[in-house]
Amino acid sequence: MPLIELRDVARHYQLGEIDVPALDGVSLAIEAGEFVAIMGQSGSGKSTLMNVLGCLDNPTSGSFLIGGTDASTLGADELAALRRERFGFIFQRYHLLPHLDARANAALPAVYAGVGAGPRGQRAQALLERLGLGGRLHHRPNELSGGQQQRVSIARALMNGGQIILADEPTGALDSASGAEMLALLKELHERGHTIILVTHDAAVAAHAHRVIELKDGKVIADNGTPAGHRLGEVQPSEAPPVPRGGWLRRLQVQWREALTTAWLALRSNRLRTALSMLGISIGIASVVSIVALTTAARTSIERDVASLMSGRIPVWIGNPTLPPGVQAKPFRPSEIESLRALDGVRSITVNRQLQLTAQHRARDATVQAVGGDANTLKARKLKLVDGRYFGAMDFESRAQVLVLDEKARDALFKRGESPLGQVVMLQLGDAMAVSAGQALPTAALPFTVIGVAAADGGALGFNGGTSQLYVPHTTFTRKLDARGEIYSFDVQLDTRVSPQQIREQLTHRLKALHGREDFSSFNAEEEFRKFQNITSAMAAVFAGVAAISLLVGGVGVMNIMLVSVSERTREIGIRMAVGARQGDVRLQFLIEAVVLCCLGGLVGVLLSWLGAQALNAVQKQVDVVVSWTALGVAFAVSSGVGLVFGTLPARRAAALSPVEALARE
């Protein structure tokens, strides 16, 4: 059975509406171990015939058999396997990858055979030393002469065995001395058992072959046939020890390692373009991470303050908009408040006793809000003492004329740096208040001694709406400042083990029974707080979405760059396919390159956002901006995803290229 057999093979190309026959009904057979020259002038079809013989191109019609297998029916990956296992190519223009040294170029076919870096490097070195390039192993193609580059291509052709050597005008780019050496090497390879198919237009070169096939206009016009008595030589290729083929897992490992290495080399060889592409991804990632961190910090700060005001309490006050006209709401009585304390889920109740008056210290005076405080007032209002003390039991029992200032009242009544503790502040009731109280309260100022200063606990929002406040014992408040016994509002502090809605329903039911109608209002602060959280979450999502647009733009930029890279590296793709790369290998290479590019950009973006957070925290203390490890991990994963998504199209386009068309491009 012939090693290669063509049966009425035709190959036509379509140029617009014109059908161009490059091969027209070619039939021939080549035995194993032959030295064949395919000869013809330019346009005769000899290069097209070599492409079909080397499984780089599929015939339009006819059958093409290699070892009895019809290659014309095989898919792209099956043809790649044939090229990888049986063929070795020697091109006129060498077709070496410029970013790889001589040894790596020679070892390239073994990568796609799943051979590990160590064994394939040893075999490539042995082959190059055999070809006289032992001192040039680590030189790149631009550092080698034409003859030396052609020797590297011979080593590459022999890497996986090279049962069939296809040489396309191997002496065309060489001087006469180097050309003679090349022909001598081909003869030597033939003597070692290789099947040599030489394509040339030079009759002198073709004369070195044992069989000459001449083409003209895509047809065989002369063929002196297989020499009489031809037989396959007993000496097999032995330029270097053969390398073991890897299993599917080993091939996968080698495939990924090669793809990562190639991606890194490609990105490094175009540093400016890589940096600009990374910049787009970096800005996108930094924007998303920074905005998420900022909105999270702002939400945390705002929600903490709002929670201090709203969470865990139910405010109740007199008045209801649904009351009939003319019906007056009743104030709450102390006995009603006491009955509410016994309800399940009520932890405590803070009565809001407050009125506006004038406070004076020496030449300074200010309008303040006086609050009657009990033992729980500071805690309920999220306040803490920053100086002095709070009211004790004796203060409540004796109705002592003592007070605690908030920071605004202190700043309004005292000079900067002056301690208010022990100082006397005069509180002046207005005339209207004295009359409405129904008591013979003097309108003269009452002296109160400052015993403490309170401030918001942990930056929590206050209850004063920006008004200066001072606190006096509730017993003193009701006896000396406001003798009315009615209560107009109070706050119910909740037990977290009971549903706030359930407690509110109980409060409403009890007060409605006591008043005879629902002449009061309340709201579930916990529920309102959750609504507020939903609003802030939605706003944070909107801000993150706006930032993500920049990431999307960066991804589109990466896709454009990768498409340009595919067009620029078409010949490299053709070389890899010629030495046995599958479509999946090419697709993985460009996909990983896009992912690596985006990951590098993502790392830079993550670093920028972290540095930005540290700088912001260093210049202000109001908001603590934290870039969490989770956010960094998610950002890195997102950048990888961007590379995966936007690298898919360029990778698919690269893998879909025809090897022969890719090799023909410059």
Image (cartoon, rainbow, N blue to C red):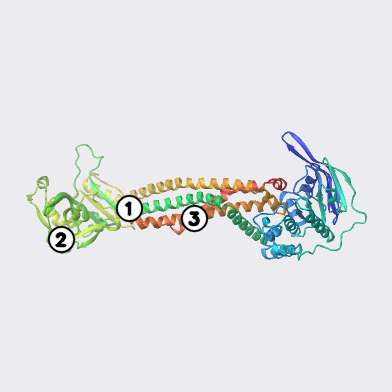
Which element is circle 3 on? helix
Q: Residues within 10 Å of mark 3 (few under 14, many from 20)?
A: many
Residue 399 position, x and y percent, is 12, 59
Which residue is denoted by mark 1 in the rendering?
500
Say if mark 1 contacts mark 3, CB within 8 Å: no
Q: How far apart, in angstroms, are the residues tagged by discs 2 and 1?
A: 31 Å
Name the residue that disc number 2 marks.
396
User: Mark 3 or mark 1, which is nearer the start of the sequence?
Assistant: 1
Amino acid at the residue labelled 3: Val
Indicate left or right for 375 with 448 as reference. Answer: right
434 sits left or right of 5 in the view: left
Q: Is residue 549 left or right of residue 1?
A: left
Q: Please tell me whether mark 1 sits on a helix, a strand or a loop.
A: helix
Q: Nearer the viewer, mark 3 or mark 2?
A: 3
**Label 2 sits on what residue type?**
Phe
Q: Which residue is mark 3?
A: 604
